[in-house]
Image: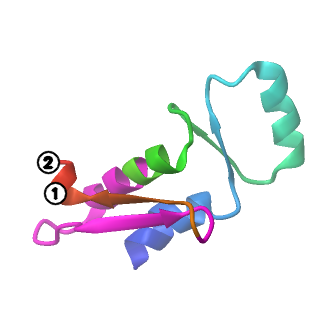
Amino acid sequence: KKIIKEHITDRLDHALVVNINTPHKELESFKNMFDNMVMVTYQPTCENLICDMALKIQKHLPKEVKLHSLKLSETVTSFAEWYASDNQ
């Protein structure tokens, strides 16, 4: 729970996630409109975000703990799932 809060929720909750390659003019206007803007090196889709989250979580888990799966919901019917067995 602490790992999720520290490395996922505190960083991404209520954040605008933007690709670092977004044109400069747009980035400047985003900075003025949003208090929490997170820059990433990939297109910030639900599918890409969940893969990034899985990597961050796995990096901070104790060696004897393995991440099994994650689910990231955009809406009630739109979500991405990540399973360790699909990513070995």
Amino acid type at circle 2 is Gln
- Whether residue 27 sits left or right of residue 10 in the image: it is right
Is residue 13 positioned above or below 15 on the image? below
User: Residue 14 occupies which quadrant of the picture?
Assistant: bottom right
Residue identifier under label 1: 85
Q: Residue at x 23, y 66 (%)?
A: 67
Q: Residue 49, percent across and down?
A: 48, 49
Residue identifier under label 2: 88
Residue at the outermost bottom position: 1
Amino acid type at circle 1 is Ser
- Which element type, helix, strand or loop, lies under badge 1? helix
Choose between 63 and 76: the one closer to the eye.
Answer: 76
User: Residue 30 occupies which quadrant of the picture?
Assistant: top right
Residue neighbourhood size for the residue with mark 1, other residues' Cα within 10 Å, grouped as few (<14), some (14–19), many (≥20)? few
Q: Residue at x 55, y 34 (%)?
A: 43
Q: Residue 84, percent across and down?
A: 21, 58
Per the rendered image, the range of residues in magenta is: 52-76
Residue at the outermost front position: 77
- Whether residue 72 sits left or right of residue 28 in the image: it is left
Q: Residue 53, percent across and down?
A: 41, 55
Inter-mark Cα distance, 2 to 1: 6 Å
Q: Is residue 33 magenta?
A: no
